[in-house]
Image (cartoon, rainbow, N blue to C red):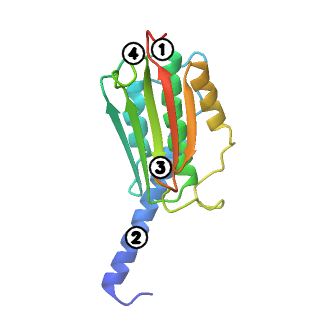
């Protein structure tokens, strides 16, 4: 054991923080890994984005949402594709990148820049590097999430780009452009 009280207290605090982060991560992964909506289920909506982002945040996972410009109407398939893309981006970052980690979700409604579309970006800073395959509490995915997200975005008339090193040399960025209502 450690004889210095200050050292023992610091180690206990680190252990508590790690336990809290792991519990938060497990709970968040249950939320993010919920099965896709069935035909009769409610379509994911933009109104749920703040809660989705908040569910992903833990003491070791800084997750932020920013929206720029005035929100415009989206066709239902584009709205669903946007929310599912954010969900996939968050899930991938939290599942595959070791904390501490920062993930930024940015939704750009700037009509002057793009009158016919909304742009969404999910980017991570690479955290402390890739998670080990045997990392506690992290299940391997099927690997089909990004492909499914791309199919949804394309089916809604949008485009998706996946980049390594987007806002940070070691992170990943998902960028999509989806049509707004009235887009040609």
In what quadrant of the picture does the N terminus appear?
Answer: bottom left
Percent x, y of residue 127: 48, 58
Q: Quadrant of residue 53?
A: top left
**Disc with the residue nearer the chain's start (2 vs 4):** 2
User: What residue is pinned by disc 3?
Assistant: 124
Give the class, few, some or many, for how many residues have Cα within 10 Å of label 4's Cα (few <14, many ≥20).
Answer: some
Report the Cα–Cα distance between label 1 and label 3.
28 Å
Report the Cα–Cα distance between label 2 and label 3.
24 Å
* 9 shown above or below 106: below
Report the Cα–Cα distance between label 2 and label 1.
46 Å
Look at the image and tell me whether residue 43 can be seen: no
Give the SS element for disc 1.
loop
Look at the image and tell me whether residue 96 can be seen: yes
Residue 75 shows which numbered tag? Answer: 1
User: What residue is pinned by disc 4?
Assistant: 73
Residue at the extreme front of the image, as rendered: 113
Report the Cα–Cα distance between label 1 and label 4.
7 Å
**Disc with the residue nearer the chain's start (2 vs 3):** 2
Residue at 36 percent of width and 18 percent of height: 72
User: What residue is pinned by disc 2?
Assistant: 14
**Disc with the residue nearer the chain's start (1 vs 3):** 1
């Amino acid at each position: 054991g450690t004889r210095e009280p200050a050292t023992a207290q610091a180690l206990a605090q680190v252990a508590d923080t790690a336990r809290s982060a792991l519990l938060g991560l497990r709970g968040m992964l249950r939320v993010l890994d919920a099965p896709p909506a069935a035909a009769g289920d409610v379509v994911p909506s933009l109104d749920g984005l703040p809660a989705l982002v908040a569910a992903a945040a833990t003491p070791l996972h800084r997750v932020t949402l920013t929206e720029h410009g005035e929100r415009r109407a989206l066709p239902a398939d584009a709205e669903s594709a946007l929310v599912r893309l954010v969900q996939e981006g968050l899930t991938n970052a939290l599942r595959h990148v070791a904390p501490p980690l920062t993930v930024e979700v940015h939704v750009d409604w700037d009509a002057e820049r793009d009158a016919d579309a909304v742009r969404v970006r999910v980017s991570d800073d690479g955290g402390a590097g890739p998670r080990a395959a045997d990392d506690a509490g992290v299940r391997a995915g099927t690997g089909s999430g990004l492909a499914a997200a791309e199919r949804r975005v394309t089916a809604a008339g949008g485009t998706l780009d996946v980049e390594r090193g987007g806002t940070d040399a070691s992170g990943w960025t998902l960028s999509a452009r989806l049509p707004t209502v009235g887009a040609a």
